[in-house]
Amino acid sequence: MSWLAQNLAEVDARIAARLLKSGRAPGSVTRIVVSKFHPASLVRELNELGVSDFGENRDQEASAKAEELADLKLTWHFIGQLQSNKVKSVIKYASTIHSLDRASLLDALSARPTDAQLGVFIQVNLTDDPGRGGIEPDDLLPFANRVVAVPHLELLGVMAVASLDGEEERDFDKVARLSEQLRVAHPTAKNISAGMSNDFELAIDYGATHLRIGTAITGKRG
Ligand SMILES: *Cc1c(COP(=O)(O)O)cnc(C)c1O
């Protein structure tokens, strides 16, 4: 088995074990492999191993890879901060934006209808620092109402990046509660995009449905 196949199998085994331990259904998460910093050839290799969901955080890099791999049936998730002037490019290949984090980006997305609905997660700010970006928890519901009013956007749920300060548990708990609030108003927006290489098992305990896993599978940047 290649090192890549081994990493993938190990991560998938950990996901399966944690779902079981959490009393959740097998396969109830989407495991997205974050391929940023890695060449298209690695994505191709992962696709041969059965991976079809990939995450990228920069349009320049992602659009080049998507073009190079156009012969494959891949699902691209845009997970990084998205500049409004890149929306036109990103919607050509991405089917889901995990990082809808501000009103001006919603405006830019609204202005560009897509053929198929574009999935979006609202990124929430879990810190006390409004400068960190993301929708403030108090603004989540009004912002969600604006998202669902856009016909070509499908609101999938909330997204968050947990802090690295040992407070992951507090953060995931906060996201889970925000997700509950969101679902009262918008029952179909039931997904939670949370959990990375260092914390995906904990994220599973708190109901994450979309894990964004990079280095645990791909190794350090190539
Ligand atoms: C890079 C990145 C990830 C993956 O991080 P790893 O620690 O390599 O698993 C997940 N989410 C976002 C938003 C990222 O930018």
Image (cartoon, grey):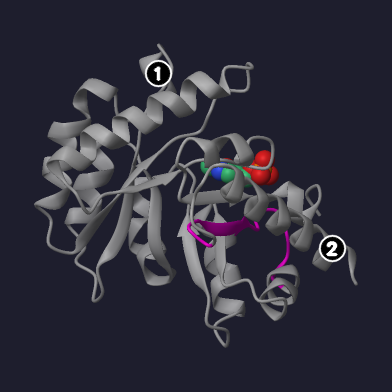
The answer to whether residue 2 shows anywhere in this view is yes
Q: Which residue is mark 2?
A: 6
Q: Quadrant of ligand 1?
A: top right
Residue at image x 54%, y 23%?
169
Label total for image: 2
The answer to whether mark 1 and mark 2 are in CB contact below 8 A is: no
Find residue 191 and report its horizontal and vertical position in percent.
Answer: 36, 49
Report the mark closest to the observer, 1 or 2: 2
Image-quadrant location for residue 139:
top left
Viewed as shown, does residue 161 lie left or right of 199?
left
Which segment is the magenta one? 27-40
Residue at image x 74%, y 48%?
215
Viewed as shown, does residue 63 lie left or right of 220?
left
Indicate yes or no: mark 1 CB to ligand 1 under 8 Å: no
Name the residue furthest top: 128
Given residues 103 and 149, the one toward you in this image is 149
Find residue 220 and report its horizontal and vertical position in percent.
Answer: 81, 47
